[in-house]
Amino acid sequence: MLTADDFKLGMRKLALPVAVISVKSDEQRNGLTASSFCSVSVDPPRFLICVGKTASAHPQISIGEGIAVNVLSETQHEQAMQFASKTHKGEQRFSLGEWNTLHTGAPILDDTTISFDCIVDNIIDDVTHSIITATVVAQKHTDNMCLLYREGKPMV
């Protein structure tokens, strides 16, 4: 039987783009670093995002309002680490970079490779994570290359 540690080692072999999933609800911003996201369809444009139930942003994201998928550029490693940190919570995570909004009010980070502004459609409760589908209602992009992680570190 495959162990959780073996599976993690296998997944670390993949090069994955890194995103900050951000949300604003009840006037509070929060977010997390994620590599568990992918497109579902192009018409309508939809995303699938997996969020761990222990993440500090999970309660706000699972409310089902607007969220943003900010695909980080290769110069935004510090933002990735700040949103992955256990010591920074909520608003503290937004101290790096410039933040704006597009359509839903979800926080959009400047200078990302691309940021998708989304409305949550469905939340599926799984064992350790919530599986979220969301429709993209706006996007903003640059020509910056995206930040990739492999073997637990950024690829340069």
Image (cartoon, rainbow, N blue to C red):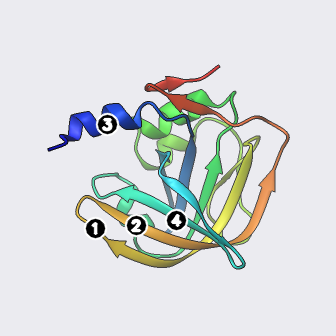
Callout 2–callout 1 Cβ contact below 8 Å: yes
Disc 2 designates what residue? Answer: 131
| First in residue order: circle 3 vs circle 2 | 3
Q: Is residue 70 left or right of residue 62?
A: right
Callout 1–callout 4 Cβ contact below 8 Å: no
User: Residue 22: percent from the left, percent from the top?
Assistant: 55, 55
Residue type highlighted by circle 3: Lys
Which quarter of the rendered picture does the C terminus lie within?
A: top right
* Residue 85 versus residue 142 in the image, above or below: above
Residue type highlighted by circle 2: Ile
Disc 3 designates what residue? Answer: 8
Camera-side mark, 3 or 1: 3
Residue type highlighted by circle 1: Asp
- Measure the C-alpha gap from mark 3 to mark 1: 18 Å
Using the image, tell me which numbered label, if any, was put on residue 2.
none
Disc 4 designates what residue? Answer: 48
Callout 3–callout 2 Cβ contact below 8 Å: no
User: Residue 11: percent from the left, percent from the top?
Assistant: 39, 38
User: Which residue in the rendered view is the most extreme toward the right?
Assistant: 143
Residue type highlighted by circle 4: Leu
